[in-house]
């Protein structure tokens, strides 16, 4: 043994145990975060049997770090606005290829929360109902006071392609606050 302290093999053994303990603690925290929160799922179809509900191919983008600093609820109806919306969506991230949209048959629903103070926030398009106009139903998710979240500011956004609606389009938003242990 040289100097004050423990020998290298003993110190290395302790470091290995601490590393394994940290890894186990991190894994446990992820499980608690993933499974421990309640009240975080939204109804997929709040509009009844005649509602349009997004399918897998309709989701164009979902990000938690968009370039939208203020809330957005918009319908994109042309290629020029679509290109600008796509760039804004990925304003804080590496560029992504612009999906081609046939605006004669489709519209893009663009929704964003703007800048939020932490993680745990999200927004999603649940459904749309057309009856003398179109109502787009959204769910906004927020962390409860006991939820563990990242301290990084976020700006959640979602872009969804939907069949071209008729009439006036309005948005109805429901906020769902997570209840965490």
Image (tube, rainbow, N blue to C red):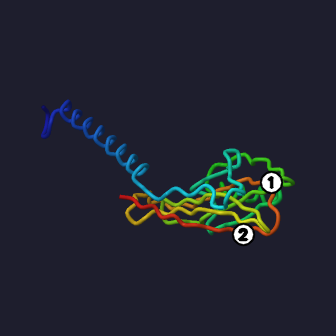
Number of other residues with Cα within 10 Å of mark 1, as a class: few under 14, some 14 to 19, many 20 or more: some
Q: Quadrant of the C terminus?
A: bottom left
The residue lying at 13 percent from left, 37 percent from top is 3
Whether residue 65 sits left or right of residue 180 in the image: it is: right
Whether residue 80 sits left or right of residue 20 in the image: it is: right
Furthest-right residue in view?
Answer: 104
In this view, the residue in front, 127 or 149, is: 127
Q: Residue 94: where, in percent of width, then height?
A: 64, 49
Q: Quadrant of the N terminus?
A: top left
Q: Which image quadrant for residue 78?
A: bottom right
The residue lying at 69 percent from left, 63 percent from top is 136
Q: Which residue is mark 1?
A: 106
Q: Residue 28: where, in percent of width, then height?
A: 34, 45
- Count of picture labels: 2
Q: Which residue is mark 2?
A: 170
Q: Earlier in the sequence, mark 2 or mark 1?
A: 1
* Spatial CA span between label 2 and label 1: 17 Å
The residue lying at 62 percent from left, 52 percent from top is 62
In this view, the residue in front, 54 or 1, is: 54
Q: Residue 18: where, in percent of width, then height?
A: 26, 40
Number of other residues with Cα within 10 Å of mark 2, as a class: few under 14, some 14 to 19, many 20 or more: some
Circles 2 and 1, Cβ within 8 Å, touching? The answer is: no
The residue lying at 67 percent from left, 57 percent from top is 89
Mark 1 secondary-structure assignment:
strand
Mark 2 secondary-structure assignment:
strand
Seen in the picture, residue 15 relative to 173 is either above or below; the reply is: above
Q: Residue 171: where, in percent of width, then height?
A: 68, 68
């Amino acid at each position: 043994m040289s100097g004050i302290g423990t020998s290298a093999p003993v110190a290395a053994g302790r470091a290995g145990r601490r590393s394994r303990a940290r890894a186990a603690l991190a894994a446990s925290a992820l499980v608690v975060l993933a499974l421990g929160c309640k009240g975080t799922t939204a109804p997929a179809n709040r509009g009844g049997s005649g509602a349009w509900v997004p399918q897998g191919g309709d989701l164009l983008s979902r990000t938690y770090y968009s370039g939208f600093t203020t809330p957005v609820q918009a319908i994109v109806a042309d290629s020029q606005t679509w290109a600008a919306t796509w760039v804004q969506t990925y304003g804080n991230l590496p560029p992504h290829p612009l999906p081609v949209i046939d605006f004669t048959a489709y519209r893009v629903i663009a929704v964003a929360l703007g800048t939020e103070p932490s993680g745990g926030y999200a927004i999603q398009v649940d459904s749309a109902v057309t009856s003398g106009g179109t109502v787009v139903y959204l769910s906004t998710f927020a962390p409860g006071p006991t939820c563990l979240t990242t301290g990084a500011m976020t700006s959640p956004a979602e872009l969804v392609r939907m069949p071209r609606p008729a009439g006036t389009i309005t948005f109805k938003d429901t906020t769902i606050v997570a209840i965490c242990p």
